Amino acid sequence: MAVTAQLVKELRERTGAGMLDCKKALEATDGNIEKAITWLREKGITKAAKKSDRVAAEGLVGLVTKGNKTVVFEVNSETDFVGISKQFLDLMAIVGETLINNDPKTVEAALQLSVNGESLETVIVHTIATIGEKITLRRFKTLHLQETQSLGVYIHSNQRIVTVLVFDGKIDETIGKQLAMHVSAMRPQFISRDDISADFLASEKAILTTEAKNDPKNVGKPDNILEKMVEGRLNKQLAEISLLDQVFVVNPDQKVSDVIKANDVSVVDMIRYEVGEGIEKEEVDFATEVMAQVRK
């Protein structure tokens, strides 16, 4: 029996399993819905799928280095205490090793990588079934260090924040860690003002201009005065979100740019992962997901 989009949709509605898992189950059972449900249950997928609509905003971040390659990644769970369980820590080790050894480009590609004969996705599903919580590989980034480059690395003690800075030039390990700690604490959005897009600048300036014009204190002030006020506020804001403009938390008498210059390096990349940041904004449109999968 042919596996149709309608069959896949029906199986998903009955089991809550993912579209790809439903398709695999139907293909393995010649399109028989009941046998496909059994197939999914035997693999623990339906038990895991029941948790798929929950929000997983806890978990841990990880970092693995091998040779000139470093991988930073985040794995999410529903509750923070799961992150200290042996099963979750074992999964973190598997994910890190799989990412560093295979160099995938996307999360989707990473989930299809083989781990002892089964996919990483299946390993995660088995862990979900064991732990009883939704678990997701949310994101990762792989860095390939050149011979002239060096790293500054900081992982917070609770393993919920990790920061990696890539320097062009050789940075002292302690200074590199301090700069990475600074990024962890101060959350800069950009390395320098040169990295800020014109669209972002225009948007922020428009917001500040509207605020200035609506402020009763500025009634009657000429446009050129308002313009200077807006420019001043914009410069202050940019200094707060640009790493090089920030005051160095380790030594408030210095700016980060001073530390960078004194060590004869430059920052070429900045990665800061904090567990769960922005997840509440990452809402999946279920209807869109279904239609995209059905059309395949």
Image: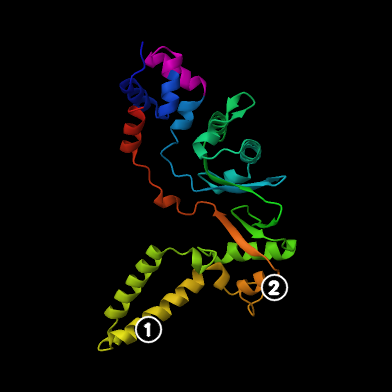
Amino acid, disc 2: Ala
Q: Secondary structure at mark 2?
A: helix
Q: Secondary structure at mark 1?
A: helix
Kindly report the distance in space between the C-alpha atoms of the residues bearing marks 2 and 1.
Answer: 33 Å
Q: Which label belongs to residue 228? A: 1
- Residue 166 place in picture, x, y as percent: 63, 57
> Is 157 located above or below residue 19 in the figure?
below
> Is 117 located above or below residue 264 in the figure?
above
Task: Please name the predominant secondary structure of the magenta segment in the image.
Answer: helix
- Residue 206 place in picture, x, y as percent: 32, 71
Residue under label 2: 262
Q: Residue at x 45, y 73 (%)?
A: 237
From the viewer's perspective, tell me whether residue 39 is left or right of residue 10: right
Question: Tag 2: Cα neighbours inside 10 Å, few (<14), some, or many (≥20)?
Answer: few
Question: Tag 1: Cα neighbours inside 10 Å, few (<14), some, or many (≥20)?
Answer: few
Number of numbered labels in the structure image: 2
Quadrant of the image occupied by residue 286: top left
Q: Quadrant of the C terminus?
A: top left
Q: Is residue 30 visible?
A: yes
Amino acid, disc 1: Lys
Q: Residue at x 58, y 43 (%)?
A: 82
- Residue 184 place in picture, x, y as percent: 59, 62
Q: Which residue is more in the foreground, 206 or 184?
A: 206
**Bounds of the magenta segment:** 26-43
Q: Quadrant of the N terminus?
A: top left
- Residue 62 place in picture, x, y as percent: 62, 47
Q: Residue at x 40, y 68 (%)?
A: 201
Q: Which label belongs to residue 211? A: none
Q: Which residue is more in the foreground, 289 or 68?
A: 68
